[in-house]
Amino acid sequence: MYVAEIPNRKSRPATLLRESYREGDKVKNRTLANLSDWPKEKVVALRAVLKGATTPTLLRDSFDVVRSLPHGHVAAVLGTLKHLNLDFTIASRHSPERDLCVAMIVGRILSPQSKLFTARSIAPETLSNSLAAVLDIVGAGEDRLYEAMDWLLPRQDAIEAALAKRHLGEHCLVMYDLTSTYFEGRHCPLARRGYSRDGQKDKLQIVVGLLTDSEGCPVAVQVFEGNTADPKTVPAQVQKLRKRFGLERIVLVGDRGMITNARLEQDIDPEGFDWITALRAPAIRKLVDSGSLEVSLFDDRDLAEIISPDYPAERLIVCRNPLLAAERTRKRNELLDATDKELVKIAQATQRPQRRLTDKASIGLRVGRVLGRFKMAKHYQVQISEGSFQFQRRTDRINAEAALDGIYVVRTSVHAQRLTSEDTVLSYKRLSKVERAFRSLKTVDLKLRPIYHHLSDRVRAHVLICMLAYYVEWHMRRALAPLLFDDEDKAGAESRRTSVVAPAQRSTSAEHKASTRRTAAALPVQSFRSLLENLATIVLDQVQIKGSDEASTFEKTTRPTPLQQKAFDLLNVRL
C-alpha cells in the first residue's frame, strides 16, 4: 500500500490510499480509500508508517521543535513570587506595568543585568528564557521598562507597609543598617562624594538604608545622598516605623555609628522605642579610665553586665572575644610593621649621599602619606627637621589599645526581665544578617552596583526592585536550605555554641552536607546559584507537527530530575 497524490486539474490534488496487485503479467493499482479530507500531518504520518517507520522514528520525523527556552529557574522564582503574593502586594489589579515590574524582579535573580539587557532578553528575536512568554510581555522595549519603574516608585510606601504588616509587630526586633554603592556618571542629584564602603574613592556614590526583621527578611529600603552621615538617616527610619507602619513598642537594633546619643535623645526615645547598639572605642576607653570597666573581669568569663553613672537607666553588657582579640592584634602588628618599613625608607632618604631628602616640608608630606595610608599616626612619635627625620613607636598607646582588643560593649534600654544579657548580645549580633543581605544585594547575587540611572526616582526604583528581588531570594533560600550548603538546623547550630560571645557554629547536619557534598536524601548539595543553573536545564519546547500550520503548535516541558523535583516540592511550586 502507498499514498498517492493525483493531480485534479483546477482543483486541489486528490490524496488516495492505493495498493498494487498483479493480474497475469500486468501490475495494476486500485484505490482503497480517498484521503483528500485528511489533515496533512495525518497523511504524512500514514505515509511514514507504510514505509516501515517505527514509532520512535515516526515521532521524531513528524515533529519540529520550533524553539526551546530555559524554563525551570523561571518557574521556580516566579512561582515563589506568586506564592508570596508579592505581585498582589505591588498592585491588587493586573496590569502590563505590574507584569513588567515582576519581570524585572525575577530577572534580577536569574541574571542581574542592565535594563537594556533585560529589554533585549524579552525581545522576540533574542528571548533568553521563558519569562517573557509566561508573563506575555514579549517585545516590551526599554522605554516600557522605564515607564514601569516610574509606575512602581509611588507604590513603594504601600508595598513596604504591607511587608511590615506581614513581618513586623509590636515588641519585635527591627534591624537597621547602611551601605553605600558607587555610581557611574555625574548627573544624578543623589550621587555625592562620601565615605565609600566599596573602596571606590574616585567615584560618586549613594547611601542605602535597609530595615529588616530579626531574621534578616527585608521590609523597607531608602536611598540617601552619597554624602549623608550615618546618624542622619535614623530619623527617617524612626518616623517610618512609627507613622507609616504604626508600630509603638519595638526594639531598634543598629550599630554604634548610627545610634548616637543625639539620635537617642532627639528621635528614638521620644517615640517610646527601645534600642540596642554598642559603644565606640573612645567611650570604652573612658569606662576603663573611670574604673567602671575592669579588664580583670574577663579572667574567668567572657561576658559581664556593668553599670556606669555616665549611662543612667541603661544596661551595659561587656563582652570579650579571644578570637577577635587575636585577629585585631595580628592586624595591628602587620600595620605597624608595614609603617616601620616605609618610615625607615624616608629616614634613609635623608641620609643617602646623593639626592638627599633635606626639605622639611617634603619630609613631612611623605611621612603624612605613610601614616595616613596605614592609619597608624596615633601610635608614632615623629621628629622632623631640615635634613633629618626620626621616629619611634609609642608603646604606651599601643599597649593601652591592645588591652582592649576583642572587647566590645553592647548598650541597650531594654529591661533585663525582657531580654537577658545573653539574649541582648545575640540580638545585636543579628545585624550580621543585614550585612549578609547587603552582600547579596551588592555583589553575590543581585548586583545592585554599579548604578547607571541618572534620574533620582529611577535610582530609587532600581534599589526598590533589588530589595524586592532579595525578598523573594530570602524566602527561596529558607525553603531550599535542605538542598543548599545553608544550615537549616538553626536550633542544632545554636546548641553547639559554647557562649553567645563565641563564634557561631554550624549544626551537625550542615557539617555533614559540607563534608559529603550530599544531602540526607543522597542528593548533591548545591549553592543557590548553581541550583538555579541546574533548574534552567528544564526547558519549555515549542513543538510543531511537520508540514502543518501554526495552529498545530503545542508546548512541552522537560521532565524534572529527582533533584529538580525536590526543589519544586520545597518551594511549593508546580512546574
Image (cartoon, helix red, strand yellow):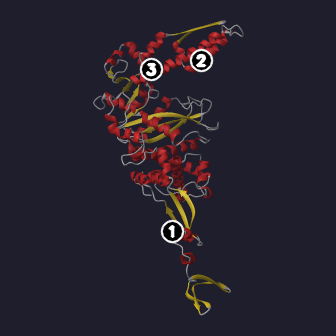
Residue 172, picture quadrant? top left
Residue 204, picture quadrant? top right
Please state, as top left, top right, bottom left or bottom right, where the N terminus lies in the image: bottom right
Q: Nearer the viewer, mark 3 or mark 1?
A: 1
Is residue 294 in view?
no
Residue 534 coordinates in the image, percent (x, y): 49, 50
N-terminal of the two: label 3 or label 2? 3
Amino acid on which disc 2 is placed: Val
Q: Is residue 174 left or right of residue 463?
A: left
User: What kind of element bears circle 3?
Assistant: helix
Q: Is residue 300 left or right of residue 526?
A: left
Give the residue at mark 3.
281
Is 427 placed above or below 95 here?
Answer: above
Q: Residue 56 — which label?
A: 1
Q: Nearer the viewer, mark 1 or mark 2?
A: 1
Number of residues whose C-alpha sits closer than 10 Å to that of mark 1, classed few (under 14), some (14–19) or many (20 or more): few
Q: CA distance from mark 3 to mark 2?
A: 23 Å
